[in-house]
Image: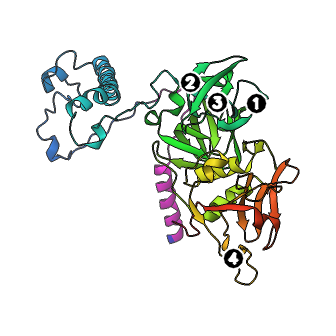
Amino acid sequence: MKRQDKQEKSSIFKGAGRKKKQVIGEEVAPKDIRHVEHPIKLPFLADMDEGKEQYGAAEDMQDKWGLSEKQATLNVVRKRRIISLAIAFAAFILLLVGVFYILPRVLPGLFKGSNIELFIEPVINLEYDDPSYRVVIDSTVSLMSEPEPASTRIAEVLYNEAVIYLDDSTNGYCKIRTLDGLEGFVTASSLISDMESVEPDVHQFKLIVSDPSKNIMTHASNGTLIKKVMMNTVLYGDIKREGVYQVTLPGGTTGWIGSSGVIELSPRAETEEVSSRYFVSSVLTFVNAKYIQNGMSVDGASVNGAVYVCAEINGISIPRTMEGQAQAGTEIIPEPDAVTGQIMIDQIQPGDILFLSSPNKAPGDTEIYEMAVCTDYGTLFMLSPARTTVRLRNFQSGDDICERIITIRRLFSSKVM
């Protein structure tokens, strides 16, 4: 009986909990809206008017924040941003103009006469403003005794070397004087009157070629050849990059030359004297060069020509001619051997210059016939017997060379200065 009563009660509750199925076509009763009997009062909503229910209402920006009509619109903000950018750009342009254009022109005048190095005006002294000056535009030019190609070659002048124009002549030659005082004739086409390429004060660097030769190119890399220049050629430049210099050439053009084999100096500086071993090293670059009377390049050299350019690049200025070089430096008088009476060649040091008489000299003849440079103990740089090349020759005490020595001159010290 108890079990039956429990089953009946559960069935009653289940029935009460079930929802009645909706029959198709039957009218649906509206759902009731539940109302909160005891609403919660939040403190921050206490000051709001519940009746008006103005939550999230739009605010009048002009009244609320005191803005004008233009300021309260988005379009005006965008326009103001564009105007601000335009003003900033204009200020940047004015700053650039002031720094790079106005200040460089105004400041030197304000600080003129002061000791501030930045504002000291460089003093430019033109060395070659006389209209008689000319500059050489060929790699080398023969200085001849007469305006004839078959006349005696006195010396050579080098590319970019300044000379003094003396007079017109015939056969396309003109008479000149070198700055060290030699007069002769050169081809007129090898000279021009534009002297900018040799004016020291208008350039930043003075460059002296110390290699036997160097090429001047149109570009810093992969350029074409403009001119081949020889040892002791002096150039001036204003731009230095890694491994190259830009140099000013005769006629106002520019070219590029590699920095190896080039001595860099300030525009008016002179090469410092070095030891004799550097002089000897330079002389040895002329070994086996073709002989040309008084020539001074690897394309055609003489002993006196090689000595001249090698001495110049190593800090000693001497004449170009053999006769002039016989008076340069210090005379060395070697002592003879006490037994044999012959010159002891170990007293002739590398770098010494020997001036010799002719192999066929008459007794008492002291005229200089040729010269030689001692490159090592018992070794001379001199003209070959066939007079076709300049080369090395060994000698020892008792040789005929020792008998032909007229004087020995020492230009360089054996110690580094």
32 horizontally vs 353: left or right: left
Disc 4 crowd rating (10 Å Cα; few below 14, some 14-19, many 20+) is some
Q: Secondary structure at mark 3?
A: strand
What residue sits right under mark 1 in the picture? 151
Is residue 260 shown to the viewer in this render?
no
What residue sits right under mark 2 in the picture? 165
Magenta range = 3-28
Residue 343: x and y in percent read 72, 73
Q: Which residue is nearer to you in this view: 411 or 339?
A: 339
Q: Which residue is nearer to you in this view: 305 or 223?
A: 305
Mark closest to the chain's N terminus, 3 or 2: 2
Q: Which residue is nearer to you in this view: 197 or 66?
A: 197
124 horizontally vs 65: left or right: right
Residue drawn 82% across the image and 65% down it? 400
How far apart are the alpha carbons under marks 3 and 2? Answer: 10 Å
The kind of residue tagged 3 is Gly
Disc marking residue 336: 4
What residue sits right under mark 3 in the picture? 184
Disc marking residue 245: none
Q: Are marks 3 and 1 in contact (CB under 8 Å)?
A: no
